[in-house]
Image: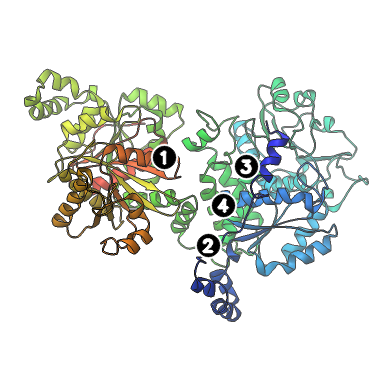
Amino acid sequence: MIRKSDALNYHSEDRPGKIEVKPIKPCFTQRDLSMAYTPGVAEPCREIEGMPEKVFDYTVRGNLVAVITNGTAVLGLGNIGPLAAKPVMEGKAVLFKRFADIDVFDLELDTKDPDQLIQAVRLLEPTFGGINLEDIKAPECFYIEEQLKETMKIPVFHDDQHGTAIISGAALINALELQRKKIDQVKLVISGAGAAGIACASLYVKLGAKIENLFLVDSKGLVYKGRKEGMNPYKQRFANGEKPMSLAEVMKGADVFAGVSAAGLVTKDMVKNMAERPIVFALANPDPEISYPDATSVRSDLIMATGRSDYPNQVNNVLGFPYIFRGALDVRATAINDEMKIEAVKSLAALAKEDVPDSVLRAYGQEMLEFGPNYIIPKPFDPRVLIREALAVAKAAVETGVARRPITDWEEYRDQLVSRLGRAQEVMRRIIHKAKEDPKRIVFLEGDDPKILRACQVILDERIAKPILLGNRAVIRKKTTELHLDLKGAKVVDPNKFERIEEYAADFFRMRCRKGITIHEARKLVRTSNYFGSMMVKLCDADGLVGGVNQYYSDTIRPALQTVPLSEGSTIIAGVYMMVFQKDVIFFADTTVNFDPTAEQLAEIAICTADRVKQLNVQPRVAMLSFSNFGSTRHPRAEKVAQATQLVKMRRPDIVIDGEMQADTAVVTEILNDVYEFNTLRKRANVLIFPSLEAGNIAYKLMERLGGAKAIGPILMGTSEAIHVLQRNCDVEDIVNTTALAVIDAQEHKHCVTEPIGWDVS
């Protein structure tokens, strides 16, 4: 429930409005000022004068869209004028930036004259990479868009028309599939003959609907052949039938109803009179043509969508315009054509059939979302929409010849889109690429856990690893079917039916017989997944292990440490988290294992962490943290850190390291170099070694919860094999990330080659 006071406070608190302009280049010194403005700015001006296309290299134009309105058809508020429309246009700017990293200027034009508006927009072309027309009434909006598209060489897109059409088109494709109907055979009724209604009709025909099966209804009733009242050329194209009919009459026997009109126009009886297995899209906002409870109360075979977020299947334009412009801008398209719109439709429809990430489920308070009557289009906060839709639109632009900067390396472009989701996504994409170069056999201890199974679908699709699932084959197959997964390529191993279980037990007994383990206990232990998985890695039946999704950390790590020896030269194990901030990545260690390490142990943790960071193609700069700066406080705890620093410098002079130092000294270059000019780091540290487990654990959790960092890990160090323990109750994305790290770890270890063991999941 949104109260009036809440909405007004949201828009007025602190600084009024919702957007601001921020510089993206430094402007702190006289030199910065001279670079940003005169005289330095003259150089890009000269370059652009000589070669206009360089405007995209030296200015923001290639990522700047104008959101333009005259306020004549604002949301459900009507003709409220350009000033009252400004909050909506600012909101549009927020959505562009939030979902597709596109910058926006909102422009409210004080004219109802279509030709004046057209002229004003034309004159703005040098400023923008694209034009998003918004909340302009019909039929003028059709004429305005047509004229601008004909004369401008940048994309022009009226979202009220095409946005609703594209999103509802994707929903229609999937609803028809679920209802077992074909688009060229169904009777479609569209209520509303304004911008959205005409655009929906046009796009549905392009998707395969027969124009003779499509009936357009406005406030005067059916748009039929020969009708005179309230007609225009855009309605005339969809005139159908020979006589006046009411909406109730037209809806009899209809397979599909799409409403983009007004609240309360459809009754329960109208829905009752539709064909079997009907589809109802009641998209009027804020109140639909018929409420979700009313429609579903009279038809159990119904699939329904609305424009509301409090019911299933929200048709929300934010699933369209940010990503369509993202793809168009990235190839410097001269237009957004029908082919680009249709590819946007197809990408959304296809994405709804894929497994939904845990982050999306959390955002919507859902435990499960899967393709079906209550989930026919992706949710607005699904981060994958950017990648799938923008990529599809960009490809269509290139294929249809409207791209001025065609993309040839689509995998690289996909990575660019991922990076727009945040630094964490960008970093993990690089790690996943490295894992994909040489996928390894990774055994999953909880092979029948739904999160593990869903993660394995991503792992197989991305070719990150070769999964081995521990558990009962029948149970795993049943859960795979229930989750609608295709895990072809994954293996299943049941410890209780494993032919070489005695070999495993004998080997484990040899290792632990002087640690209090009898042969009987060894046979019992190796049948449990934790011990069995570790033995698989030790005996070369798997290259790495991932587990702990529903276990305490210690319960997972203990069997691994009893089975797999430490790496050569190691005396301890430790855990490191990769903390991904908005613009930086910093590694925190030890955060999971050692309570109060000695100077020797701290030195070993630092060396292990530096080596592991190098595996991830990052050059480590290690800071040994304390409450003291280079001897400023004499205390045994500070001296321990200083001693550990000297041990590392003696043993590994190739590692860039210094300490003891306080945390702000380590990460603020000005403090590091201005106050302690003798330091050997010179730049801010990217590896932080904490003096105790409590310090490391507190720091990473505070940074994750209050500092906006994404914690990836923990990455276990010091073992001779790729053993990686998940945090209890982690999500699917964390499992995929940890698996990629396990594969990279396994790539560093030499393994004997054995034949794959286990049954196929299928």
> Label 3 vs label 1: CA separation?
26 Å
> Label 3 vs label 4: CA separation?
20 Å
Image coordinates for residue 445, horizontal then vertical, percent: 29, 30
- Label pair 3/4, CB-CB below 8 angstroms: no
Disc 4 marks a residue whose amino acid type is Ala
Tag nearer the camera, 3 or 4:
4
- Label pair 2/4, CB-CB below 8 angstroms: no
- Quadrant containing the C terminus is top left
Query: Looking at the image, can residue 720 be seen?
Result: yes
Image coordinates for residue 603, horizontal then vertical, percent: 18, 48
Residue at the disc numbered 1 = 733
Q: Tell me the residue at 83%/63% (across/down).
A: 115
Mark 2: secondary structure? loop
Q: Considering only order in the chain, which callout, 4 or 2, is on the residue closer to the N terminus?
A: 2
Label 1 environment density (alpha carbons within 10 Å; few <14, some 14–19, many ≥20): some
> Label 2 vs label 3: CA separation?
37 Å
> Label 2 vs label 1: CA separation?
31 Å
Q: Considering only order in the chain, which callout, 1 or 2, is on the residue closer to the N terminus?
A: 2
Q: Is residue 503 left or right of residue 702?
A: left
- Quadrant containing the N terminus is top right
Q: Considering only order in the chain, which callout, 1 or 4, is on the residue closer to the N terminus?
A: 4
Residue at the disc numbered 3 = 170
Residue at the disc numbered 4 = 100
Mark 1: secondary structure? helix
Label 3 environment density (alpha carbons within 10 Å; few <14, some 14–19, many ≥20): many
Residue at the disc numbered 2 = 24
